[in-house]
Image: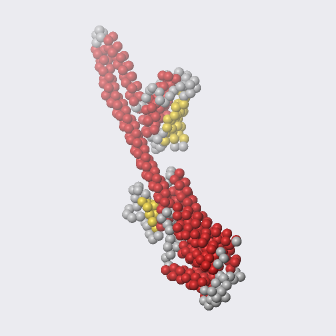
Amino acid sequence: MALLVLGVVAGCSFVVAGLVTRAQVPGGHGGGLMAGIGLLLLLAGLTYIPGRAAQFLGNGFGWVALTLLAHLVLAIPEGRVRSGALVVLLYGGMSASLVVWAVDGPRPFAIAVAIYMWVFGGVLAGALVWRWLVRVPRPRRHTFAPVALAGGVMVLTMWMRQGAGIWPDGSHASSAEPMLHLGALAALALWPLAVLAGMLRARLDHVAVARVAAQVDRTPEALEAVLATVLRDPSLRLVQGTDGPPPVGAGRSCVSLGSGEAVLVYDAALDADPALVRSAAAIARLVVENERMRAELAARLAEVRASRARIVAAGDAERRRIERNLHDGAQQRLAGLAVTLGRIRVNDDGKLAGLVDEAAAGLRDAMAELRELAGGIHPVILTEAGLGAALRSLAEGAAVPVAVEAPDGRLSAAVEQAAYFVAAEALANVVKHAGASKVTVTARVDGGLLRLDVRDDGIGGARMDGGGTGLRGLADRVAALDGTLCLESPPGQGTSLRAELPVQERR
């Protein structure tokens, strides 16, 4: 009864595993063959029905199932038996065994057939081990391992059992046959489970690749390492920018990633699972495309920064030109008019003295305003003495007390100008809006940055996006130098305007 139950379990396990394999691999023939073997194993249960005919049919179905099972094992992993000699040995041995088994009475060739069965069972088991170690590529060994292990045990025990069942005296049992029969059926019932375990491990590979899809922010180099680990293919390479055909040798395959010349080169054994290759290629394609877009974005940002810096530099150059024109042009002409008015007064008889004095006073005021305007456009002291002197000069002319702490060293002209105009705009806003009683201006170089901080004790409430354009313009100027501008102005607690600018000290 135990043998019958095990036989039914083995047959059902083959049928179920075959149907599952057929559903998961629609284009393959292994699933249908497994299901057919399962049906033959169920029909082999006729052996336990009394009567010569039932036993003959049951054993015949068992022999055919065993032969087809050996054929299926030999076809792993390519799906076909590549050696014609093995096919001849397999089906020739089955035919001879059937003839010997069908003979009643003495069997003069039974010992030879039994030895053949044992030897061929060992050959089948050895073929499985050899295929796992040599023929099956590394990326597929983990899925083939349970099939090879369980299949080797199953084939060896099944064929040894069949060989033990043929003896010259006409009996169908030796002392070892019952134990071999029980072990063979147990191994037979477990082998389909090993096949399903291999399919499950292959499915887990798909899950692992899908998890990699959540990491498309990786660099191509990092993705290459992850895919090589997940797919168990240490030779996998993500090749970009190749000139001509990709480096694909024997046993290698590649798939284009559709982004320039990028290709994914991998072990050809992975082609046995096209869906897995497509998933890996899709992820690699996303990463390569993201990397390309990041490179383009970085290039465009660099171009924008360079253009902003050029705009700021052009504006500064224009300010210097206007300052020079005012100094060399309008101021010189006004100075000439002052000299002329002085001569008129000296030569006058006294009638025009009052008018000349009035005109001279107005001229002096105009010249003072013009000098102040020219200094605001581009202060000469900033160019000649540097940021520290310019900030102290700015504080001296402020309408509120200003304490300045600034270095005397020179920095690049662009950084000094940006810092100066930040301080000038902040002091102008203090006078106009803050109602402050004191202001502190601190500038220091720390860690490759110029840190400028303008603080007041006024009413606060200032905003970067307020009605004026001064702070927004300063933010653009600072950003053009890869710097930052930060405003903190809680109501009733004063205002702090901080600028950080990358610096290169002037030598």
Q: In the displayed structure, does residue 197 sit left or right of residue 177?
A: left
Residue 456: x and y, percent?
55, 26
Q: Residue at x 47, y 67 (%)?
A: 268
250 vs 478, nearest the viewer: 250
Q: Residue at x 51, y 53 (%)?
A: 213
Q: Residue furthest top?
A: 351
Residue 374 seen in this snapshot: yes
Residue lying at 29% horizontally and 19% vertically, measured from the top left: 340
Image quarter hosting the N terminus: bottom right
- The answer, for residue 93, to whether it is visible in the render is no
Report the residue that reaches farthest toward the right. 175
Tell me what residue is drawn at x 58 percent, y 82 percent.
Answer: 98
Residue 129, relative to residue 319: is it above or below? Answer: below
Quadrant assignment, res 144: bottom right
Count the marks: how many?
A: 0
The colour scheme applied to this rendered structure is: secondary structure
Please state the horizontal and vertical placement of residue 273, each as a whole percent of the image.
50, 63
- Name the one closer to the observer, 32 or 42: 42
Is residue 270 or residue 86 the one in the foreground? Answer: 86
Q: Residue furthest bottom?
A: 108
Residue 292 lies, with reference to residue 188, above or below; the image says above
Indicate the position of residue 489 as horizontal and vertical percent values: 54, 28
Quarter of the image for residue 168 reads bottom right
Which x, y percent locates residue 194?
Answer: 61, 67
- Whether residue 163 sits left or right of residue 455 in the image: it is right
